[in-house]
Amino acid sequence: MRLIAASEVEQALDFPALVERLRTAFRAGCTVPPRHHHHVHVPDSPDAPASDATLLLMPAWVEGRFMGVKIVSVFPGNAARGVDSVLGTYVLLSAQTGQPLAALDGRMLTLRRTAAASALAAKYLARTDSHRMLMVGTGALASQLVLAHASVRPIREVLIWGRNFDKAERLAKVLDGRRLSVRAARDLEAAVTGADVISCATMTREPLVLGRWLKPGQHLDLVGAYTVDMREADDEAVSKARVYVDTRAGALKEAGDIVQPIRNGVLQEAEVAGELAELAQGRVAGRSYHNQITLFKSVGTALEDLAAAVMVFERTRSPGSGDALR
């Protein structure tokens, strides 16, 4: 069994190719059992339960080809310890023999596939002339989302907003240059109003993006807020938008940005316009008109992990290997 480090995962998963690989995987489908989602109490934490952890086990397989499982831990309190909040490992196996093939850095795999899934959604939902982006959040996923969206739309101007302006400014300096002009924003409302694509990757429990700020034609990409008690956009934002999700099974159960508006009577389950597989298969339409506001909520699916892991496995072994998910 090969061990594949984060640097190798990142190099193998360039966004244009990964976005296309995910599109192909969503079109083809695979077996994705419900993820195992476990609450883990963190003793002696000063801000429990907010700092309690989550253990995720995410299996998937393509019969006769590949299967795998991602083991992920989410420890919100790690930020205060100087440790990444999201860590994990992906184990890839043969679906013919069960033989373990590789263990991949799960953190980088998750960052790249999550950003690529949002970019795939944006190919269907964001205006083709979108060139201004707002990134809400300054964590490890923020830079990946900026680069992923810029790989599918002509993004030229990017604002970074975070609760800590210094962190936003540092991230902006890292990303600024070449074809992207990136700077930090102090005024979230003004930044939302001026953006074509608004991407959020935070752990907030209170909405940051308010519907009254949204303008016609915008695309809202909600990636953080991964439990029913968390959300990044308010009810008005949801009510103004045509809503899409990566999977209904995940979003209708786990995503506060979907579950809470449904509980509040703002959104009906039947009003969720589609999921990524339906978009990729052409079974539902994406953006219908220029001034439409679209919203994509991501909670993640093991299909994305498997597709990305197979891509890494193929690209880090000898040339001439087949493509398991095509």
Image (cartoon, rainbow, N blue to C red):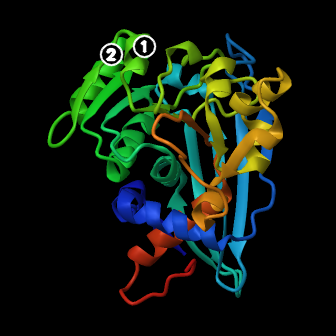
Quarter of the figure that contains the C terminus: bottom right
Read off the residue under disc 2: 185
Which residue sits at x=49%, y=68%?
A: 21
Q: Is residue 149 left or right of residue 42?
A: left
Quarter holding the N terminus?
Answer: bottom right
Observer able to see residue 114: yes
Q: What residue do we see at 39% from left, 66% from top?
A: 17
Front position in the image: 325 or 297: 297
Q: Which residue is drawn at 45% across and 69% down?
A: 312
Q: Position of residue 314 (x, y in %)?
A: 45, 77
Which label was assigned to residue 188?
A: 1
Rendered view: 145 above or below 314? above
Crowding at mark 1 (Cα within 10 Å: few <14, some 14-19, many 20+): some
| Distance of label 2 from label 1 (alpha carbons) | 7 Å
Above/below status of 294 relative to 247: above
Q: What residue type is labelled 1?
A: Leu
Residue sitting nearer the eye, 185 or 216:
216
Mark 2: few, some, or many residues within 10 Å (few <14, many ≥20)? many
Q: Position of residue 91 (x, y in %)?
A: 61, 65
- Residue found farthest to the bottom: 320
Q: Which of 158 and 204 is in front in this view?
A: 158
Which percent across, then down, holds residue 261? 76, 25
Q: Which of 256 and 99 is in front in this view?
A: 256
Q: What element carries label 1?
A: helix
* Residue 36, x across and y down, in percent: 80, 49
277 horizontally vs 164: left or right? right
